[in-house]
């Protein structure tokens, strides 16, 4: 596979790569490092699975994957005490393994190194280079809303930037909500003698309720280890406005998970409602936007797919 072909695979399903030329150069390196970090703060859901799928692609291209289980970050973001967060981190790790990252994936607990002198020295240096306004702005889509924000929210992006240097990341992967922090890292790391990573940004998945972001704290998620009954219930209650394609979580699930894995969506329905259907991506968009496909029929097709798609995850988690 040529480097251009590899780039095309990585670009598919991402919003941007900064910069593509730098990523192409990394393809020729031996075991470049791709990193992403997750706050251990609840269930692993389809929003996380989007970045995991991209990590799996990079892994197949020879990248060494490092996943930061960011316990201190979760603590700074008000997600609980460190003891409980570490328990959640172990559960999260098993979910990532269940989603298919291979055995060579390296999982790093943030608190295992984030008090070391080299790391804290970088945080202090970054603090002298980053304005308070820039630090707060970089957290807009990451931190919980707080009318009286804590100093912790401005330390968070500096630590995340220092993580990239400490973990020797050649690539930093994250959802679009991470963009401002990653751009801060691209700008400031070279100023303290560290390399700036290539940044890959994936889309945010809308919540099942139509909210801008799927989140365990909002309860608008499909967990990767949800039971078939829970999946069916959540999808049936989900937001799916008739005829609307944009910002429709059911359409997004099809585009990010279903069609990358199979050519058609299968929709089971009684003969009196037209009988069973198999639709390509193009046919689905055309029929749904013309209101020729009922939202409940689409939901049934999405539910059936997710139940089967996530079955290996449920089996792994039960071991």
Image (cartoon, grey):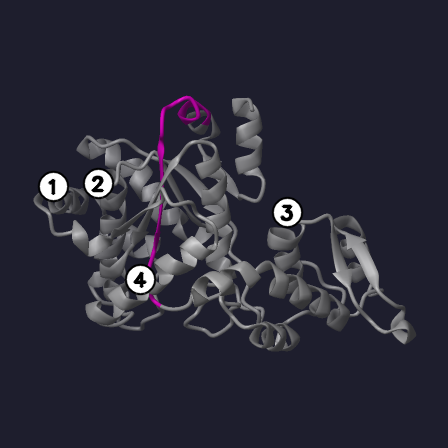
Marks 3 and 1 sit apart, C-alpha to C-alpha, by 42 Å
Of circles 3 and 4, the one toward us is 4
The answer to whether 157 appears left or right of 42 in the picture is left
Q: What element carries label 4?
A: helix
Instruction: Classify 10 Å Cα crowding around label 4: few (below 14), some (14-19), many (20 and above).
Output: some
Residue at coordinates 42% horizontally, 64% vertically from top-left? Answer: 319
Marks 3 and 2 sit apart, C-alpha to C-alpha, by 34 Å
The residue tagged 1 is 118
Marks 4 and 2 sit apart, C-alpha to C-alpha, by 22 Å
The residue tagged 3 is 260
Of circles 3 and 2, the one toward us is 3
Question: Does the magenta segment cover residue 37?
Answer: yes
Which residues make up the magenta segment? 24-41
The residue closer to the viewer here, 197 or 189, is: 197
Q: Percent x, y for residue 167?
A: 25, 40
Instruction: Classify 10 Å Cα crowding around label 1: few (below 14), some (14-19), many (20 and above).
Output: few
The residue tagged 4 is 90
Name of the residue lying farthest toward the left = 117
Instruction: Classify 10 Å Cα crowding around label 2: few (below 14), some (14-19), many (20 and above).
Output: some
- Does 128 sit above or below residue 224? above
Marks 4 and 1 sit apart, C-alpha to C-alpha, by 26 Å
Residue at coordinates 28% horizontally, 63% vertically from top-left? Answer: 74
Q: Percent x, y for residue 105?
A: 36, 44
Residues at discs 2 and 1 in contact (Cβ within 8 Å): yes
Marks 3 and 4 sit apart, C-alpha to C-alpha, by 29 Å
């Amino acid at each position: 596979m040529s480097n251009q072909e590899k780039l095309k695979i990585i670009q598919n399903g991402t919003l941007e790569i900064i910069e593509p030329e730098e990523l192409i150069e990394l393809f020729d390196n031996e075991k470049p490092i791709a990193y992403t970090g997750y706050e251990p703060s609840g269930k692993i859901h389809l929003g996380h699975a989007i970045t995991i799928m991209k990590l799996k692609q990079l892994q197949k291209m020879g990248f060494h994957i490092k996943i930061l289980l960011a316990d201190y970050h979760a603590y700074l973001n008000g997600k609980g005490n460190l003891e409980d967060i570490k328990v959640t981190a172990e559960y999260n790790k098993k979910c990532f393994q269940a989603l298919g990252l291979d055995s060579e994936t390296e999982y790093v607990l943030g608190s295992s190194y984030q008090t070391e002198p080299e790391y804290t020295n970088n945080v202090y240096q970054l603090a002298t280079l980053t304005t308070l306004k820039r630090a707060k702005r970089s957290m807009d889509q990451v931190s919980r809303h707080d009318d009286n924000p804590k100093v912790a929210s401005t330390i968070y992006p500096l630590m995340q930037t220092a993580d990239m240097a400490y973990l020797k990341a050649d690539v930093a992967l994250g959802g679009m909500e991470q963009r401002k922090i990653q751009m801060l890292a691209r700008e400031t790391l070279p100023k303290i003698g560290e390399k700036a990573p290539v940044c890959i940004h994936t889309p945010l998945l809308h919540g099942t309720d139509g909210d801008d972001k799927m989140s365990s704290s909002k309860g608008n998620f499909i967990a990767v280890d949800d039971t078939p009954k829970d999946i069916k219930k959540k999808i049936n209650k989900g937001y799916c406005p008739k005829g609307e394609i944009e910002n429709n979580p059911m359409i997004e699930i099809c585009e990010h998970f279903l069609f990358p894995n199979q050519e058609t969506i299968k929709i089971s329905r009684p003969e009196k409602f037209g009988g069973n259907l198999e639709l390509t991506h193009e046919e689905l968009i055309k029929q749904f936007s013309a209101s020729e496909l009922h939202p409940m029929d689409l939901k049934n097709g999405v539910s059936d797919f997710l139940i089967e798609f996530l079955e290996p995850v449920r089996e792994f988690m039960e071991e």
